[in-house]
Amino acid sequence: MRKEERRVRMMICVAGLAMLVLAASTSAADLPEKFDPARDAARDVATAVSLARAEGKRVIVDVGGEWCPWCHTLDRFVATHAAVGTRARAHYVWVKVNVSKANRNDSLLARWPRIAGYPHLFVLDASGRLLHSQDTGLLEAGDSYDEARMVAFLDRWSHD
């Protein structure tokens, strides 16, 4: 093996090791449970992407606010519908990004398509590339969400 090839392989190994160390030092507990205007949303999304890469998952960026009744409805729906919650935990790292008068997170959200309403879900791959922009209004049924539509959405974007 040539010296240059060994050097490239060594750099790849070091980069892989660095990713493992970073993933081991971060966890889903490092991500917000609520929409918090004091959080660094760009850092939270970067943490979610790192976790997704390490765990072989994708990322759901949940954009909304504590002021948003439908955001709370979505949280309750995911928590109380096993088919939805199981898929979300198995295939995604879920990260909340606040939008409010206190912090609109404009610079982060400018990366992705414009949002018409809240909550709004962006699906990212494990490298942070946008795969899908989901208007959650299309997943609603009455005063909650439709389980079949939510499961279809999660299944559709959980893999290539």
Image (tube, rainbow, N blue to C red):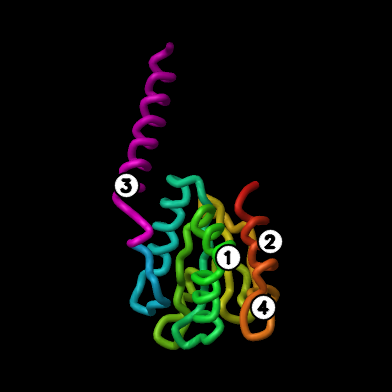
Q: Circle 4 sits in a helix, a strand or a loop, which is it?
A: strand
Crowding at dot 4, Cα within 10 Å, few <14 / some 14-19 / many 20+, comes out as: some
First in sequence, mark 3 or 4: give its number. 3
Where on the picture, by quarter, is residue 156? bottom right
Q: In the rendered structure, are the residues bearing label 2 and label 1 in contact, judged by CB atoms less than 8 Å apart?
A: no
* Distance CA(mark 4)–CA(mark 1): 17 Å
- In the picture of the structure, the residue carrying the numbered disc 3 is 24
| Residue most extreme to the top | 1
Q: In the rendered structure, are the residues bearing label 4 and label 2 in contact, judged by CB atoms less than 8 Å apart?
A: no
Rendered residue at 56%/83% (across/down): 70
First in sequence, mark 3 or 1: give its number. 3
* Amino acid carrying mark 2 in the image: Ala
* Amino acid carrying mark 4 in the image: Glu
- In the picture of the structure, the residue carrying the numbered disc 1 is 122
Q: Nearer the viewer, residue 79 or 51?
A: 79
Residue 3 percent location from the top left of the image: 38, 15
Q: Circle 1 sits in a helix, a strand or a loop, which is it?
A: strand
* Amino acid carrying mark 3 in the image: Ala
Membership of 89 in magenta stretch? no
Residue 29 percent location from the top left of the image: 34, 61
- Left of 113 or right of it: where is 9? left
Labelled disc at residue 152: 2
Residue bounds of the magenta highlight? 1-29
Labelled disc at residue 140: 4
Nearer the observer: mark 4 or 1; the answer is: 4
First in sequence, mark 2 or 3: give its number. 3
